[in-house]
Image: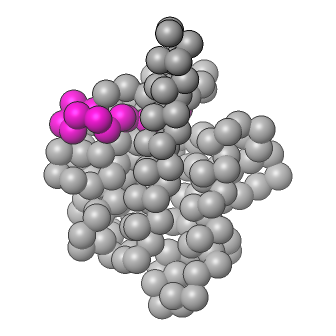
Amino acid sequence: MLKFVENPYFRGCKDVILKKDNKELNIFYGGNLDIYFEMTDTENFESETIEYIVKNEEKTWIYFNRLISEIINSNDIDSKNELVKNNTINWYSDETYKEAANILSIKKEKEGIRLVFHKNSDYESYSLGIPIRIRNVGSRYKPFNMSFMKLYNEFQELAKKEEEKIMEEER
């Protein structure tokens, strides 16, 4: 299930929430102007690893597929070699130094796009989930942080269209 909720820091921006069973992926613009992907398993807050699959038939699959294609097909070899191994994107959170960072792995598979969140036990977080920070400025994976920003912006456009549709139906 996909839903949008008002971002508490920025009026007009929506938090993107993808929920499936007991798993909830929240993509949001933080108060520090960075993008966050945060995965929570509502049945097990102690999970060290949480998987979420965006199925091929879901409308959100298109956005994640574009993200993967843009990164994997990039000509920026040095940055790509740091980020992509065996067609899997491994984003170490920009929140802290790499050795202590949580990791988001993204891979396209037959059944969909697999997102795997790995919690690093060396990193202490005040979150119930596994947060991944994607810095807009100063990311270790520049220029691919902008690919994640594009993904977020695509979701914002979808939120606007859905809002307009609801307003039209109410008239």
Position of residue 64 measured from the top left corner of the image (x, y, whole percent): 60, 53
Q: Which residues are magenta?
A: 7-18
Front residue of 5/19: it is: 5
Front residue of 44/133: it is: 133
The quarter of the image holding the N terminus is top right
Position of 17 with respect to 95 (left or right) is right
The single residue placed furthest to the top in the displayed view is 170
Position of 52 with respect to 56 (left or right) is left
The relative height of residue 23 versus residue 156 in the rendered view (above or below) is above
Q: How many numbered tags mark residues here?
A: 0
Residue at 70 percent across and 37 percent down: it is 58
Position of residue 56 measured from the top left corner of the image (x, y, whole percent): 77, 44
Position of 65 with respect to 80 (left or right) is right
Residue at 62 percent across and 60 percent down: it is 66
Position of 21 with respect to 137 (left or right) is right
Instruction: Check residue 135 for magenta coloring.
Output: no
The relative height of residue 34 versus residue 47 in the rendered view (above or below) is below
